[in-house]
Image: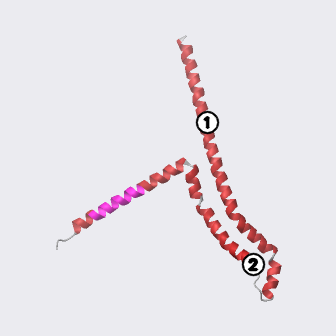
Amino acid sequence: MFLRAYSRDVSIRRSFVRQSDAKRQGGSIKSTAMLSLAIVLVFLVCNTLRAGLNLHEMVTLQKRMSCWAAGFPGIPVWALAGANVSEFMLMVSSSVNFFIYACFNRTFRTSVASICSRTTRDSSVLSKRATKRTKTNATPV
């Protein structure tokens, strides 16, 4: 009788552990999916203008060449301004990924925090050593 109660208790615990593992794994999969979706959306938003400008350039190439041959500028002002905005958006796209990872990934945040605290601790130790050396090497006047 005691053995049956014990085996039932063990099987209940095992099923509970399996369920909690599945929930944890499901949360991890959701987090990874959200991270990937955010990166792809930022990429698409930031690269759409450049793709549009490239498409416009291809479509109007003949017209632009005839304008240049006649001595006129062949590039519209909005395209010139759009090129500058596009370059800025491409720069944002490449640099915002760090913040997306930090927002969606707890492991990434803790790793960055430990690296930064280690770097700060190491630099403070180095500055203390340098101060100590300066004091010991100082000659009295």
> Looking at the image, is 68 positioned above or below residue 92?
below
- The secondary element bearing badge 2 is classed as loop
Q: Which residues are magenta?
A: 118-131
Whether residue 34 appears in magenta in the rendering, the answer is no
Q: Residues within 10 Å of mark 2 (few under 14, many from 20)?
A: few
Q: Nearer the viewer, mark 2 or mark 1?
A: 2
Q: Up-down: is 16 above or below 104?
A: above
- For the N terminus, the image quarter is top right
- The residue closer to the viewer here, 117 or 10, is 117
- Find numbered disc 1 in the image and state the secondary structure of the residue it sits on: helix
Cα–Cα span, label 2 and label 1: 55 Å
Considering only vertical position in the picture, is 68 above or below 94?
Answer: below
Q: Residue at x 53, y 12 (%)?
A: 2
Residue 6 in the image: x percent, y percent? 54, 17
- The residue carrying mark 1 is 23
Q: Amino acid at mark 1?
A: Lys
Q: Is 129 covered by the magenta stretch?
A: yes
Label 2: which residue?
76
Residue 78, image x, y percentages = 73, 75
Instruction: Please give the name of the residue rendered at 56% of the width and 25% of the height, measured from the top-left corner.
Output: 13
| Residue 93 image-quadrant placement | bottom right
Mark before the other along the chain sequence, 2 or 1: 1
Find residue 66 and report its horizontal and vertical position in percent: 82, 84
Mark 2 residue type:
Pro
Q: Residue shown at 55%/15% (left/top)?
A: 5
Q: Is residue 101 left or right of residue 119?
A: right
16 w.r.t. 75: above or below: above
